[in-house]
Image: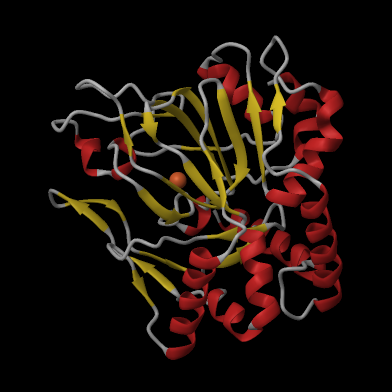
Amino acid sequence: MNATIDHMTAALNDCEENSPFLLENEGAYQAWRLRKLKLREQLPASRVFELDHEHRLPQSLLPQLRLQVSAFNFVLFQSESEISKSEFLRLNRQFGLFRLDSNLGADVDKVTSLRVVSDSDERAQYIPYTNRALNWHTDGYYNPHGRRIGAFALYCVNQAERGGGNYLFDHELMYILIRDQAPDLLAALMDDDLMRIPPNIQNGRVIRAQESGPVFSIQSDSCGLNMRYTSRPRNIVWKSDKRSERALNLVREILMDSDAVIDLRLQNNQGIVCNNLLHGRQAFHDQGEQSSRLIYRARYYDAIDFDRAQEPQAAEV
Ligand SMILES: [Fe+2]
């Protein structure tokens, strides 16, 4: 265990030397920022990449996929026919996503089948398993330090008749907007005690221990930017000093006013692979009693890393 922590600390130290996400590295930040904003101008965010007949992304698309992720932190894809859950996981491995997170509602293969469940199902208490709207969040913001979510993927087997769209906001763009106008507030968002999640206790059993942490941090293995956030007021305690309040208000203002919000409504056989950016979901409705909306979701401790996917052992998986 200690060896793991030592390894993570060493990895983080390596990241910090050149990371554009540390306030002291102004040169690295400006270079990274310039490239990212330029790419965002040049590329269409809503480009949909076609899978081949084996439900893989052709290797020839790799250079464009890399640019798409650098610009927007997500890639949209579609298949000619429905893909299986194992093909979905294989596709995600092309993005260097291997270490799956599990959660209470996940299937045995750690893919979660997001659908409306009956009231008697214990998952019905969680909004993802209802047809209600989900406000701005990043996935697994309540996870403990060693299980931060770096990326996730969705695949739409069946979309609802009405609603069910998603909206996205690139967390790296949020970082840029805050750092450019208020670096002191960005520092507040990197404070380790900014966000506290009370324990999840049900029937006297601790399902999840209390968890504290920052909004923005540097992912130790990828050196990428990780964001933890929820706009839900329930089950979360924010640090209440003035600077923290101003920082959180700025995040909310940007989400409300920015024209950088991307609306996305996955069609059947379409999906998204993304780093853990800010997102939400609209409410949805189907005719008839039983909703047929079905989305597969996989969450990963890894962030997208095409080089990891290219390693020899990855090709065998
Ligand atoms: Fe989510």
Give the residue displayed 20% in from the left and 36% down from the top.
Answer: 122
Identify whether 79 is placed above or below 41. above
Give the residue displayed 41% in from the left and 88% down from the top.
Answer: 241
Where residue 41 appears, as percent x and y from the top left, is: 80, 54
Is 295 left or right of 264, judged from the image as shown? left
Is 235 left or right of 309, judged from the image as shown? left
Q: Quadrant of residue 198?
A: bottom left
Which quadrant of the figure contains the C terminus? top right
Camera sees residue 169: yes
Give the residue displayed 84% in from the left and 58% down from the top.
Answer: 38
Where residue 23 appears, as percent x and y from the top left, is: 72, 79
Where residue 202 appears, as percent x and y from the top left, is: 17, 49
Identify whether 77 is placed above or below 14. above
Q: Quadrant of residue 51?
A: top right
Is 259 left or right of 230, judged from the image as shown? right
Where residue 95 appears, as percent x and y from the top left, is: 70, 35
